Amino acid sequence: MTDQPARQADVPARGVEGELHRDRQLGGRDLTHWATPPGRWLAGLVERVGVALGARQTLVLILAVGATVAATMSWLASETYEAVTESEGVALWDQPLLDTMLTLRSPGLDTFVTGFTNVGGVIGMPVLALSLTAFLTVRRQSWTPVLLVVAAATGSLLMTIVGKNLIGRSRPPLSSAVPPFEHTASFPSGHSLNALVVAGVIAYLVVLRQKSARARVLTVSVAALFAFAMGMSRVFLGHHWFTDVLAAWVLGLGWLTVVITAHRLYLTTRLRTRETIVDAS
């Protein structure tokens, strides 16, 4: 019992060894353990690629393939959106929700929400993401946070561009919007998509190093609240219909799952490669 703190202190916290020791467990679950046959097959395939290319290069390759998946997801979302709007469905919520937001507006609240939504814009979100990523990178002495956050943000941007070009949906009328007005296509909401993906991947990296369940719940809750508030701010300001935001959330969750899976495969490849080297020696 007396040497337990010493053993904990000996566990590396930085670099590749830090990743293998500190990032493999999430709430008692070993992320390098694949319970299903498809998971084990995928892990085995990636391991073979990792032997040829290296673990870090394999992670980049997986994320690049994931970008293609992201574009495909946007295409599927656009097809689903057209089917939904043809039969109305959730699109029936768009105008009533916008009408409700109009009744809640006031000069002070409009200014506050506009300031908040700018955090998710083309300047605010990159600054926020780069700041948090730089902190995680320096703290861990590893480039993995950079790869994951940049890939996640790039994928969400690609999905936004593809979705807007495929659908070309008009935004709510300017008479219902709070200036400054936006004129690009409305579907999907880029602010909502980027906020969910970036906040999600950063929260994931943070909770990997948190031992307290309460801390993990708090971290995930803050990230989820940020993404939810960003999406609803777009509806409040009349810059997007609610279905644009809803589609962005669905796409974001799908892409976030791909990014997290890629990181799990990276950790698995790192671990198995190290075990192979140890066994050979």
Image (cartoon, rainbow, N blue to C red):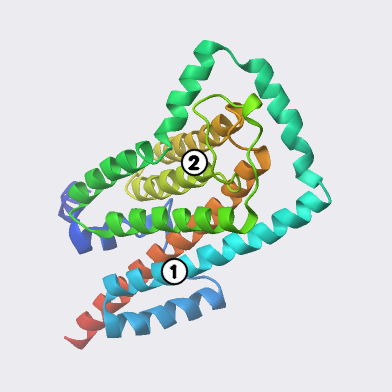
**Earlier-in-chain disc, 2 versus 1:** 1
Give neighbour class at mark 1: few <14, some 14-19, many 20+ (Cα, 10 Å). Answer: some
Query: At numbered mark 2, what does the secondary structure look like: helix, strand or loop?
Result: helix
Q: Position of residue 139 (x, y in %)?
A: 20, 47
Determine whether 137 is above or below 34 in the image.
Answer: above
- The residue type indicated by label 2 comes to His
Which is in the foreground here, disc 2 or disc 1?
2
Query: Is 47 placed left or right of 41 in the picture?
Result: left
Q: Position of residue 49 (x, y in %)?
A: 35, 83
Q: Which residue is mark 1?
A: 33
Determine whether 204 is above or below 116 in the image.
Answer: below
Q: Residue at x 44, y 60 (%)?
A: 259
**Snapshot quadrant of residue 11:** bottom left
Query: Is 7 placed left or right of 64 in the picture?
Result: left
Q: Position of residue 38 (x, y in %)?
A: 55, 77
Q: Residue at x 21, y 57 (%)?
A: 142
Between 277 and 170, the residue placed more toward the observer is 170
Q: Which residue is mark 2?
A: 191
Query: At numbered mark 1, what does the secondary structure look like: helix, strand or loop?
Result: loop
Determine whether 2 is above or below 279 in the image.
Answer: above
User: How far is the residue under mark 2 from the one under mark 1?
Assistant: 34 Å
Give neighbour class at mark 2: few <14, some 14-19, many 20+ (Cα, 10 Å). Answer: many
- The residue type indicated by label 1 comes to His
Between 25 and 99, the residue placed more toward the observer is 99
Residue 267: which numbered mark, if any?
Answer: none
Q: Position of residue 65 (x, y in %)?
A: 44, 72
Q: Residue at x 43, y 36 (%)?
A: 214
Query: Is 27 placed left or right of 245 in the picture?
Result: left
In the rendered image, the quadrant that contains the C terminus is bottom left
Q: Residue at x 36, y 73 (%)?
A: 61
Query: Outermost residue toward the bottom?
Result: 280
